[in-house]
Amino acid sequence: MRGRLFDEERRQFLQVSFIAGVGLVVGCSFHKAEASLDAPASPVEKASKPLAPNAWIRISGSGEVTVVVNHSELGQGIFTALAMIAAEELEADWSKVRTEMASMDPVYANPAFGVQATGGSTSVRTCWVALKKAGAATRELLVAAAASTWGVSVRECRAESGKVVHGPSGRSLLYGQLVEKAASMPVPHDVPLKKHRDFKVIGKKMRRLDTELKTQGRAVFGMDVRLKGLLTAVVVHPPVFGARLKSLDHSKAMSMPGVRHVVPISTGVAVVADRFWQAKKAVETLRIEWDQGNKANLGSENIRARWVELAKQRGDRVRDQGDVDIALKKAAKVVEAVYELPFQAHGCPEPMNCTAFVRGDGCDVWVPTQNQGGSHEIAAAITGLDLDRVRVHTTFSGGGFGRRGDVDFVAEAVEVSKAVKVPVKVVWTREEDIRNDHFRPASYHVLRAGLDATGKPVALHYLFVGPSWMDGMIETLAPAIMPRWFPRFLKNAAAHGAVPIAKYFKSAEAASEGASTMAYAMEHIRVEYIKDDPGVPTGAWRSVAHSGHAFVVESFVDEIAMASGNDPFQLRMDLLRNAPKRRKVLKIAAEKSGWEKKPPDGIHRGIAVHDFHDTPAAMVTEVSVDKAGQVRVHRVVCAVDCGTVINPKNVEAQISGAIAFGLTATLKGSITIGKGRAEQSNFDDFPLLRMDEMPKVEVHIVESEAAPTGIGEVGVPPIAPAVANAVFAATGKRIRKLPITSRDLAKG
C-alpha cells in the first residue's frame, strides 16, 4: 500500500480506468465471488477500462501486482495475509506484490456482517475462497494470453513467479508483458485451485507488506490526514453518562489565538481551531451547564448491589439441556462460586479521530475504522446526502480491538464539518478517549456445579447479570441509520450467507457467547442471562463476550477439579471428549509446557482452553507471586488450531498481542464508575501492560489443511483464567474478580 492515500485520483479509484500501458484489472463481486467466476466467460474489456468497479487484482505494465483489500489494517497483518492468498493462486512474484485499501462500496461487504466491516476474526475466513478464485482466474488468463502470443497450447505453458513459461522451449513472458493481450481475451471460469501440498506462499513466514511504510513513517494513520484548509476540533463530552447541553458561554474561547468556531453537537461541544493544542486549551475556558439527567449518582457499588439482588431471580435461558434442578438436588457434592468482571476500556494507541469534509454536493470521510458501512451510513444520514455522494477513505489504524466498530467519532466529525463548511479533523484527547469509551460490559456471575459420587461433574447452572455489548453497538447506530440501513442489512445478509449474524441482534445471544457455547460434556447444563443495563456505554471489546465467560468458566472448572481431586488438565481432557480440536490444543499446550513435570522453585502453572468461532486455543502459564502479592507472568505456552495458516508470523504476532492485551485486563486496568462517569482518564490510572512485564510467549500451531478459521481474538479469552489458576496454585487463593491486585494476595 502506498503512502499517498488521499490524492483525488485515489479517491476516484472505482471510477477511473487503467490504460493498457498501466494495467489489467480482474474483478468479481465479493459476495458472489464463486458465482461470478463460475459463470459463462465474458470478454475482458480493453485495459483502458476495468472489467468491473469492484476489482481485486490489478497488474501493471511493469508487472506490479496490486491486491485490493476490503478489510481494515489495524495492526493485525491482514493486508499481507490477503495478498498472500491472492498471490499464491496467481503465481505472483512476491517482491512485486502491493496492497491497496478498497474504497467503500457495497460489493466489498463482509459476508459475515452484510456490510463492509472488520471484526470477529472474519477477514481471512471470509476472503479465503474469493481471493483464491480471483487469483486463479487471473493466472489462467495470463497463461492463455502467453499461449496465444506464442501460438502454442495452454497445456504447454505454466505460470511461476510472475511470468508464464513455455515448457518445451523454455521461453517466458513476464506478467507485465501480457496485460494488453490478456485484456482482449475472455476470463476463464471453473479454474483449478491449487492443492495444499503445492502452496509456495501460503504457510511461509513472510515479512509484512506494511512494515517498511510504518518503520519509515510513511504509513498514513487517521491522525496523519492532511487537507488544504483543514481545521482541528476537540470535543468536550458531558461529565455524566446521558447528560445533555443546557447552556454554553464560549466568549473566552472565541477570543483565543487560532480558535475559529465553537459548535454544539449531539454528543457535546466542539472547539474548532487551526491547531490541536489551540483547540484543547480553548476547551478549558468553556463555561458549560449540563442537564445531568438521572445518572449523576451512578457508581460501581450501586451497580453491583443491584446485580447481587437480580442474581437471586431467574433469567432468560440461553442454553438448557437435561434437568439441572433435579441433578443438583441429587448431586453428591455441589460446588458454588460467584465471579465478577469490571468494565474495560480499549486503550487504543491512536485515540479516536476522524476527518470529514462536507460540501453541498458531497461528503468525504477519512477515518481509521472497522466499520466502513456504518461510517458511510451515518455520514449520509447526518448530511442528508444520497449514499453515492458520500465517500469513506480508510486509513491505517493504531489499534482497534472492536472500538473502531462504533461510529460516534465519525458522526462528530461530519456534524462539525457540516456546521463550519470546511474540512475538520476531530481528535479525542486521551482523557476523552478513555472516559467516553464504549466499554466491555461489567458482569456478575453465579455458578453451581453438581458432582456425582465419583467426583465427576454432571450438572452446571450458570447465571449471569449485566448489559449486552450488542445493545451498546445498536444504540450508537440506531438513531441515525437503522431506519434505512437495517432493511438493506437483512436483505444483504440473507442473499450472501450472513443470516447467522442476525442472532447477535438478540442481546442474550451476543452476551452469552463463551458460556452458552462451552463444550464441556455434562448431561445437565443451564445458562441463564439477566439483562440489566445501568446506562454505561458498552460495545465490542476484543473477543467480545468470550473474554469474560472464559475467565469464569475456566476458573470454575479448576475449582471443580480441586473439589473432586482431579488434575485440572486431565479433567478438561475428560470433559472435552466431544470436542477433538480443543482436546488436541490442550494436549499440545500441556506437553510443550512440561505440565507433568515439576516447575522450578517459586514458579506455578495454570491452564485454560477456549474456542472462538471454531478456533480453539489452550494456554499454560508460569507465574510467580512475591510476598507483596505482586504477580509476575514469566512464560505462556499456547497451542492454537486456526485451520490453514496463511502467515505463521502473523499467527504468532496475533497470539502475542492478544496475550499482552488480555494481561492488561487480568493484572492492570479496569474502569470503575463514580458520579455517573468513568473514574479513569489516562494511562496513569488505567495502566497497560509494560514491555518489561511481557512474558516469554511460545506459540505452537496445529498443522491443518482445513479452511482458515481466524486468529485475531482467540488469544484473549484463555489468558486471564490461565493466570488466575496459576495464582491459585501459588497462593491457595482463588481469584474470582479481575483485575488481580496485590492487596488481595499480599502475605501479612
Image (cartoon, grey):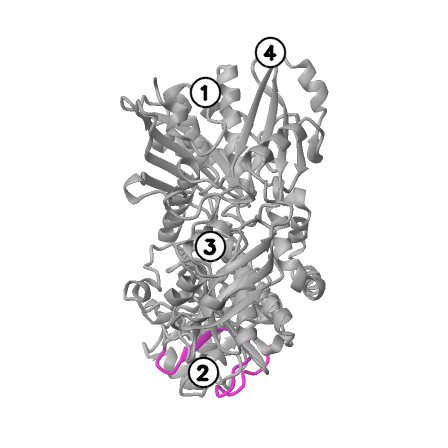
Q: Is residue 608 above or below residue 112?
A: above
Near-viewer residue (715 or 398) = 398
Separation of residues labelled 3 and 4 (CA atoms): 55 Å
Q: Residue at x 35, y 78 (%)?
A: 174
Q: Nearer the viewer, mark 1 or mark 2?
A: 2
Q: Are marks 3 and 4 in contact (CB under 8 Å)?
A: no
Q: Quadrant of residue 725?
A: top left
Q: Position of residue 231 (x, y in %)?
A: 44, 73
What is the spatial separation of the Cα atoms under label 1 and label 4, in whole angstroms? 17 Å
Q: Earlier in the sequence, mark 1 or mark 3?
A: 3
| Pointer 1 or 2: first along the chain | 2
Distance, label 1 to label 2, CA atoms, is 63 Å
In the rendered view, tell whether residue 10 sits above or below residue 379. below
**Residue under pointer 2:** 9
| Mark in the foreground, 2 or 3 | 3
Secondary structure beneath label 3: helix
Which kind of residue does numbered mark 4 sit on?
A: Ala
The answer, for residue 260, to whether it is visible in the render is yes
